[in-house]
Amino acid sequence: MVTAEHGNSEYVAIWVWLVALLVIGLAIVALPIPKVVVVALVFAVAVVKAAMVVRNYMHLKSEHMLIIAIAMVPVLLFIGLMITLVPDIAMRP
Amino acid sequence: MEAEVSAGTLKPGMIMEETPTTDTVGRIPVGKMGVWWFLASEIMVFGGLIICYTLFRIQHGGWESEAAHVNWRLGALNTLVLLTSSMTMILAFGAVESDDRAKVKLYLAMTVALGLAFLGVKSIEYTHEIREGFTPLSGLFWSFYYMMTGLHALHVTAGIVLNAMLLGLATKGSLWPHRQQRVEFAGLYWHFVDVVWIFLFPLLYLV
């Protein structure tokens, strides 16, 4: 059985990870690497941070399938829109 | 002893006591289901804005000179503030689970204070930017900047009001025994506001 104290220490550990990822995101911007790599890395870090909050603080990792579906459908729509629309602008001569 | 009064037995002058909502969809409380439906619609609101911003930014060559004027240090500070407030909010939920009423009040108060700190930092940023002449009418980047951060700040304000109401109920002792589930529902909303900022920060301040 998970005790309240154990649960709280887990929540604090997640926060420490989130702060560490914030610092990593800031450090990436200062790296002497191509801009496109910086953008990709910074958003990869943001996705990891968001996933940690949603999974652990919003408890989506242990949530009912229906709730997961409600949350994921708009996210997939967002990703689909991005994938279909960005090339239209980015590849325009 | 609490009398169970159904709407059908109410007589003129009687006031029906608020009772806990036990309705479920499957095994999911309707309140939680409602919050998640609301958050799903919010994903599309912010998602639509983020898509438009990204498309315009690519089309206009990156807006790097405009983005150089936003204060990333204050943005990073606000990210830290919101991440910390998410932790205090989930600790309030943990305290509800373990029925530690003093800690529920403490963590809710901390969440409200951190939310106010976020708005304070944001208002310092806005003041500085407007004094430098960067208003919502200064160009497309600034229109998006004020639109997205302003809409997010409105959501933070709504979260602060919600959490302050819960803190009020907890202080009066009327959060228990029927309303403590609201801490979880308010927490879901607050964490969502945090997640939105996790994406707005790199979009507007870092790249």
Image: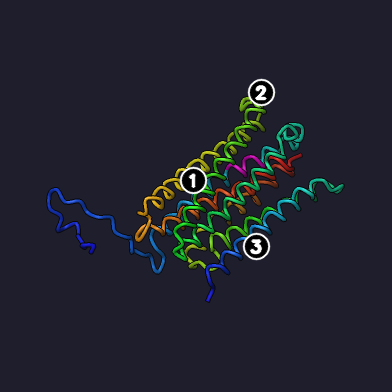
| Residues at marks 3 and 1, CA–CA distance in whole angstroms | 24 Å
Please tell me whether residue A12 belongs to the stretch shown in magenta: no
Sort mark 2 into few (<14), some (14-19) or many (20+) by Cα contacts within 10 Å: few
Q: Is residue B171 visible?
A: yes
The amino acid marked with disc number 3 is: Ala
Q: For mark 2, what is the residue?
A: B131
Q: Residue at x 56, y 36 (%)?
A: B150
The amino acid marked with disc number 2 is: Arg
Q: For mark 1, what is the residue?
A: B159
Mark 2 element type: helix
Which residues, given as a range, are shown in magenta?
B49-54
Q: Residue furthest left?
A: B12
Say which of B112 and B69 sits in front: B112
Q: For mark 3, what is the residue?
A: A13
Q: Where is residue B139 drawn, in percent x and y?
A: 66, 27
Q: Residue at x 19, y 60 (%)?
A: B5
Q: Where is residue A88 drawn, in percent x and y?
A: 68, 44
The amino acid marked with disc number 1 is: Gly
Mark 1 element type: helix
Q: Is residue B99 left or right of residue A82?
A: left
Q: Where is residue B71 drawn, in percent x and y?
A: 71, 36
Discs 3/1, front:
3
Mark 3 element type: helix
| Residues at marks 2 and 1, CA–CA distance in whole angstroms | 29 Å
Q: Residue at x 62, y 44 (%)?
A: B51
